[in-house]
Image (cartoon, rainbow, N blue to C red):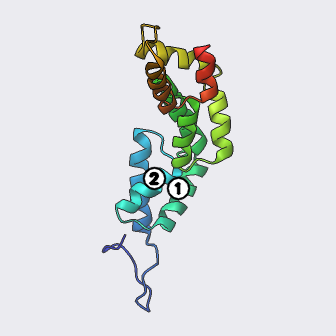
Amino acid sequence: MKNKDTLRNPDGIDGMESPQESKNIKNACLRLLTRRDHSRKEIQDKLAVKGYDRSQVSSVVDELAQQSWQDDTRYAESYARVRSQKGFGPVRIAYELRQQGISQDTVDKIVQATTEDWMAVLERVYTKKYPESVERDGSERARRIRFLLQRGFSSTMINILFK
């Protein structure tokens, strides 16, 4: 972010990070993290929109991660737990976590650990949306399958539910 707090080197080239700029970035990060956990990518994107330099933000986030203020694994666990409670399936949760910059290994572990019984979540979502279990015709069944696929359940899980 170029402002009056940014120092210039003697050649007049920007790029030197002032202590005040670093403090501003740290304060902005802490404001975000005190409300809820954020992924590293989320913090970088939010602060980039505000005009902060990504490399400066990255170094501040590294420092905050060492102090356990920011943790992608903790964020992913919390996010997956909340989304599964809202009735979203493992496929969609994994996709959303990858979009937020969480590594594939972490996503796989979190989705496995979040809910041991995804079928119970699937049944709860299905019975809430369709309390009457009678399907009138093939198009009704297809509509119900599309709904469950959009919620993030695999076709294998859906087929088991309908058997």
Gap between marks 1 and 2, in whole Å? 8 Å
The reply to whether discs 1 and 2 touch (Cβ–Cβ < 8 Å) is yes
* In front of the other: 160 or 65: 160
What residue does disc 2 label?
43
The residue type indicated by label 1 comes to Val
Which tag is nearer the camera, tag 1 or tag 2?
A: 2
Residue 112 is left or right of residue 9, and the answer is right
- Quadrant where the N terminus sits is bottom left
Q: Which residue is drawn at 51% across and 59% down?
A: 60
Residue 61, which numbered label?
Answer: 1
Q: Can residue 118 be seen in this view?
A: no
Q: Which of 120 and 66 is in front in this view?
A: 120
Local SS, label 1 = helix
The residue depicted at 58 percent of the width and 48 percent of the height is: 67
Which of pointers 1 and 2 lies earlier in the amino acid sequence?
A: 2
Q: Is residue 14 above or below residue 79?
A: below
- Which percent across, then down, holds residue 129? 41, 16
Amino acid type, mark 2? Ile
- The percent position of residue 136, horizontal first and vertical second, equals 43, 12
Rendering coords of residue 157 (x, y %): 62, 23
User: Neighbour class for label 1 at 10 Å: few (<14), some, many (≥20)?
Assistant: many
Q: Which element is circle 2 on?
A: helix
